[in-house]
């Protein structure tokens, strides 16, 4: 059986959960190993071999893993003897494995290829990693175009999946007049725009499930719920979900909500990768608070339209089930 090594900084991160789901969904065709610096999930549908390496701070990871800790990484590579190494971050792993003599894939997450002001060394490492890698997989069409335009490398597009068994419609939850947001509470997620919508729509409750340092206005109809490990019950309890981010790459929270049978009001950049406007959700422009307010009110007050979109949303999410996405990865691995 061929061996696949997935390299990821931390299994506790959002990208780490993607790595874990991919590893679990590969249908026994690969012996899967994960190289990481921090453990995450403890349950698995299949046997997965996890190899831990010392965790470092981000500014020093690429240099240290490429020099001081290189013998330790090379020893793991020698012991596992993978047929393919799949790095789910450009840095540090995409750079580290570029010269290990193994077939390598890099999957940029999005934020790891965007410019960072005053970080020329970081840009050098990213460019070298992408240029020297024989295969790049992006999870969205937008990101694929971005790396082509900015780094002059071709890529294949394979979207991120969603666990449609863990995230599924529930018949037990009482419906309420709740607008749910899930994600980090930071400005680029459109939280302040959502607060303006909440102030204009006092008849609805707004729940924010996440953590962050952003100073959010105190409103009687807005609740900060904090971070939740098990988010599916919140999707089930909400009426609709709102994601007014300024920009996204391929946001998994939207797919999770759709898999739970919830329709979205979301911004175009990122969510348009899988939301068809008016069919399984409503797309608005970033910073367009008026359209955000009008779309939330429309879905909350038009039960027939909302339920139609909910059914379509679930059907759309099933197309992104991890079992289907894993088969696309298996087919791509075979081409290598």
Image (tube, helix red, strand yellow):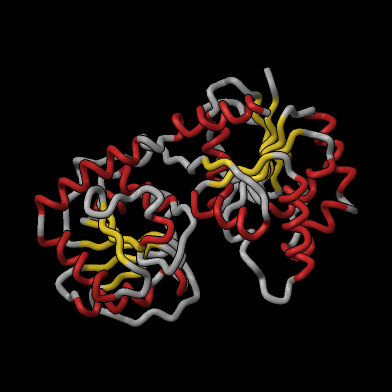
- The picture places residue 84, in percent across and down from the top left corner, at 71, 31
Task: Please indicate, yes or no, whether residue 289 appears anywhere in the rendered image.
Answer: yes
Horizontal relation, residue 105 to residue 215: left or right: right
Q: In which quarter of the image is the C terminus?
A: top right
Asked whether, in this view, residue 244 is left or right of residue 131, the answer is: left
What residue is rendered at 30% in x and 60% in y? 283
Front residue (pair 270, 216):
270
Residue 214 location, x and y as percent? Answer: 46, 77
In this rendering, the answer to whether 296 lies above or below 276 is below
Q: How many marks?
A: 0
Instruction: Report the front residue among 276 and 20.
Output: 276
Q: Could you tell me residue 76's position as x and y percent? A: 81, 36
Q: Is 93 left or right of 284, judged from the image as shown?
A: right
Q: Is residue 39 visible?
A: no
**Residue at 34% across / 47% down in the picture?**
232
As displayed, is residue 259 above or below residue 66?
Answer: above
Residue farthest along the top direction in this orientation: 1
Q: Which of the 4 quarters of the picture holds residue 314? A: top left
- Residue 176 in picture, x, y percent from top left: 17, 58
Which residue: 10% across, 57% down?
302
**Residue in the image at 39% along x and 71% along y:** 190
On screen, residue 8 above or below 213: above
Which image quadrant for residue 284? Answer: bottom left
Q: In this view, does 82 lie to the left or right of 27?
A: right
Residue nearest the observer in this picture, 298 or 25: 298
Quadrant location, the N terminus: top right
């Amino acid at each position: 059986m061929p061996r696949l090594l997935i390299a990821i900084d931390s299994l506790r991160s959002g990208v780490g959960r993607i790595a874990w789901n991919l590893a679990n969904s590969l249908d026994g065709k690969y012996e899967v190993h994960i190289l990481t610096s921090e453990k995450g999930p403890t349950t698995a549908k299949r046997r997965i071999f996890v190899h831990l390496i010392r965790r470092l701070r981000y500014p020093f990871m690429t240099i240290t893993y490429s020099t001081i800790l290189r013998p330790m990484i090379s020893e793991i590579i020698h012991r596992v003897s993978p047929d393919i190494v799949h790095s789910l971050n450009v840095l540090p792993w995409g750079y580290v494995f570029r010269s290990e003599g193994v077939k390598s894939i890099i999957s940029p997450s999005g934020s790891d290829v965007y410019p960072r002001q005053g970080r020329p060394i970081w840009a050098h490492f990213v460019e070298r990693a992408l240029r020297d890698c024989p295969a790049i997989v992006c999870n969205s069409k937008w990101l694929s175009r971005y790396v082509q335009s900015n780094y002059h490398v071709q890529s294949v597009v394979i979207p991120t999946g969603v666990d449609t068994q863990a995230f599924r419609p529930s018949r037990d939850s009482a419906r309420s007049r709740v607008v749910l947001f899930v994600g980090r509470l930071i400005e680029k997620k459109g939280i302040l725009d959502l607060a303006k919508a909440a102030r204009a729509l006092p008849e609805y409750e707004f729940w924010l499930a996440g953590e962050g340092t952003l100073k959010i206005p105190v409103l009687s109809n807005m609740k900060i719920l904090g971070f939740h490990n098990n988010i599916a019950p919140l999707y089930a309890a909400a009426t609709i979900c709102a994601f007014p981010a300024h920009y996204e790459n391929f946001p998994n929270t939207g797919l999770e909500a759709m898999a739970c049978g919830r329709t979205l009001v979301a911004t175009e950049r990122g969510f348009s990768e899988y939301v068809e406007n008016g069919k399984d959700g409503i797309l608005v422009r970033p910073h367009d608070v008026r359209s955000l307010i009008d779309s939330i009110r429309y879905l909350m007050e038009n039960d027939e339209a909302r339920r139609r979109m909910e059914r379509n949303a679930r059907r759309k999410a099933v197309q992104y089930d991890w079992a289907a996405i894993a088969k696309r990865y298996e087919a791509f691995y075979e081409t290598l």
